[in-house]
Amino acid sequence: MAKNLLLLNGPNLNLLGSREPEVYGASTLADIEHAAQAQAMAAGASLSCFQSNHEGALIDRIHAAKTAGVDAIVINPGGLTHTSVALRDALAGVAIPFVEVHISNIYQRESFRHHSFLSAIAIGTICGLGIDGYRFAIDFVLKKR
């Protein structure tokens, strides 16, 4: 079982709760993070959270996860999903298992959102299930790793 988890959120996810509520819902990032930490704690694990609008900061945090003994990562890379080879390389480079999460169904949206640079190396991908996707991803890595 994974004991040390990292929840990463990419660009614009700090706007959850006010950004396009018809797509992303009314929950804030703080709501998601608190629920995720409580879920991990109830399972006897720890979960740290990090959000950035900057690709380099996310990459630095992924690199730091390796030396911090992170067992698994749950990541919603936001728009970087469709553009960032560097984020993919960072995740591949640290070789920490990760689940990719998207609140909306990226395949029901604009065609440029249909490609993910991360999915091919993720242990799983969850999209279109709203914020429940975070809970499912955390549950999966808690049981799987």
Image (cartoon, rainbow, N blue to C red):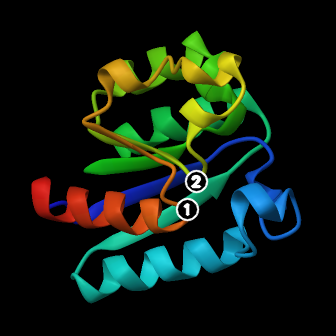
Q: Which amino acid does the dot numbered 2 rest on?
A: Ile
Reply above or below: 143 against 13: below
Residue in the image at 22% along x and 59% along y: 140
Which disc is residue 103 wearing?
A: 2
Which of disc 1 and disc 2 is earlier in sequence? 2
Residue 53 visible in rendering: yes
Residue 142, horizontal then vertical, whole percent:
20, 64
In whole angstroms, how far apart are the C-alphas of marks 2 and 1?
4 Å
Residue 129, horizontal then vertical, whole percent:
48, 58
- Locate residue 64 relative to residue 44 in the image: left or right: right
Residue 50 falls in which quadrant of the image?
bottom right
**Mark 1, other Cα within 10 Å: few <14 / some 14–19 / many ≥20:** some
Does the CB distance between marks 2 and 1 fall below 8 Å?
yes
Residue 124, horizontal then vertical, whole percent:
29, 39
Query: Judging from the image, what secondary structure is the residue with disc 1 in?
Result: loop
**Mark 2, other Cα within 10 Å: few <14 / some 14–19 / many ≥20:** some
Reply above or below: 12 against 26: above
Residue in the image at 46% along x and 74% along y: 36
- Locate residue 2 relative to residue 131 in the image: left or right: left
Give the residue at the far front of this rendering. Answer: 108
Quadrant of image for the N terminus: bottom left
The residue at which mark 1 appears reads as 130
